[in-house]
Image: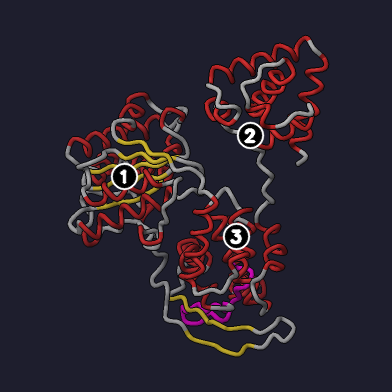
Amino acid sequence: MVETVETELNPKHLWGKCLDIIRDNISPEQYAASFAFVELHSFEDGKLVLDVPSEFVKKVLEENFLPLMASTFKRVFNGRIKALYYNVAVVKNKRGGDVIEKTEIAPQVKNGAPRDDARKTPDDVTAPQVQDLDSQLLPHYNFDNYLEGDSNRLARSVGESIANNPAKTFNPFFVYGPSGCGKTHLINAIGLRIKELHPHMRVLYLSAHLFTVQYTDAVRQNKVNDFIRFYQTIDTLILDDVQELSGKTQTQNTFFHIFNHLHVNGKQIILSADRPPIAIQGLEDRLLTRFKWGMLAEIEKPTQNLRYGILSAKVEKEGLKIPANVLKFISENVEDSVRDLEGIINSLMAYSVVYNCDINMGLVKKVMPRFVEKAEHKITIEDVKECVCDYYNLKVSQLDSRVRTQQIAFARQMAMYLSNQLTDKSHVQIGLNIGNRNHATVIHAIKQIKDMMEVDEKTQQDVEELTNMLRAK
């Protein structure tokens, strides 16, 4: 029994439990790129010392995982950690395994987890003054490192306007777009700029999920009135991932009253979601109406040029040496998320440090499949036109022409039908790219091919073969 207790209190055993919790709360890619290289150095007198292979890995941990680490350490070590230190070592090739440099780093966590009080139910009696209110904003998500492109130009412009004059231009401001497109970065940047230009204002950022958790706690503790009064004192309320309110009727009702109070009293409200308000199922009509009062701005997935710019800026900021052709390759193949771009760079740097090798195309092609699924080739309208013309022995210029012979007209309709089925382009965009036709012509073409497929086996066979050919490209 004594041996079991000693084992459970052993720092190495506790560190292993910490890693298990962290592994369950982040993706395998994030864990492999960051925590796989972190080891326990020592734990004495409340001081936890971790071995990390480089300053870069230390910075990744601090910027991305510090709240998770702090809360995990506090829980597993039962609050016995007073400070966290890093022991930074520059490591040679794994085969040698020699540590050639060690540097003691100042404490990074004191007296528990940073931002740990964010989950507590707000209390109007103990509501902090402006200078004491933790805005919960992420300092590295600012306008200085938020690159502008076609996909986010409108949203950024509106955001800067709001930051300069809160509640005077667009209120509420509702920004939406797919995961990883930069919504959280933008709304944080707005909050930080407001705090910079208007230091007297109370600014608060939180997720809709955390708002729901706080509200549930308030109900349980019979403190709903305190909860509402606290939020009514905020000058700029930034609520992320609003779609998380879907179906939560009581939480929505409470937020409705908070929203009304803030709006009537000239306070800025900033919201984000992964879809426009009208597309969020389970949202109360009166709340939906208010979300549409101000400005809606969509952020699309970053273009290839913007992705390259983001990578270049990160590499420059971190002082890394990565060839331009490597950055170009990554930007062309990682299309969905800015987070994926940053994850790839972090992973490459970690591999470079541990294995003491340069970051080149060979390392990229080795690392990328482990962290990002290979992007499938996206079928374009041009792909469809070329495939259809090859299949029917025509020239693309004939397809785009005004000639209406039966063979060309049928091939043109087939190209329009397949473009509608296999690309994400609208009827207007398809028409413009196939002979500069209008959207009504495209709709008619789609209907014609559908009707023929029901009665003509040859047309159905052509569609199947062309579809397989395009998907096999």
Circle 1 crowding by C-alpha within 10 Å: few under 14, some 14–19, many from 20: some
Which circle's residue, 3 or 2, is located before the other in the chain?
3
Quadrant (top left, top right, bottom left, bottom right) of the C terminus: top right
Q: Which residue is mark 2?
A: 381
Question: Which of the 4 image quadrants contains residue 452?
Answer: top right
Residue 178 as seen in the image, left or right of residue 361: left
The circle drawn on residue 110 is none
Locate residue 295, reporting x and y percent.
32, 36
Q: CA distance from mark 1 to mark 2?
A: 33 Å
Circle 2: residue type: Ile
Circle 3 crowding by C-alpha within 10 Å: few under 14, some 14–19, many from 20: some
Circle 1: residue type: Val
Question: Residue at position x 49%, y 59% from top?
Answer: 309
Above or below, 468 against 29 in this view is above
For the stretch drawn in magenta, the main secondary structure is strand
Quadrant (top left, top right, bottom left, bottom right) of the N terminus: bottom right
- Of circles 3 and 2, the one toward us is 2
Residue 10 as seen in the image, left or right of residue 105: right
Question: Residue at position x 65%, y 76% from top?
Answer: 358
Locate residue 291, reporting x and y percent.
33, 32
**Can residue 212 be spotted in the picture?**
no
Residue 422 as seen in the image, left or right of residue 209: right
Above or below, 264 against 420 in this view is below
Locate residue 357, reporting x and y percent.
67, 77
| Front residue of this view, candidates 247 and 201 | 201
Q: Which residue is mark 1?
A: 158
Residue 462 as seen in the image, left or right of residue 152: right
Range of residues picked out in magenta: 34-52
Question: Residue at position x 57%, y 65% from top?
Answer: 345
Circle 3: residue type: Lys
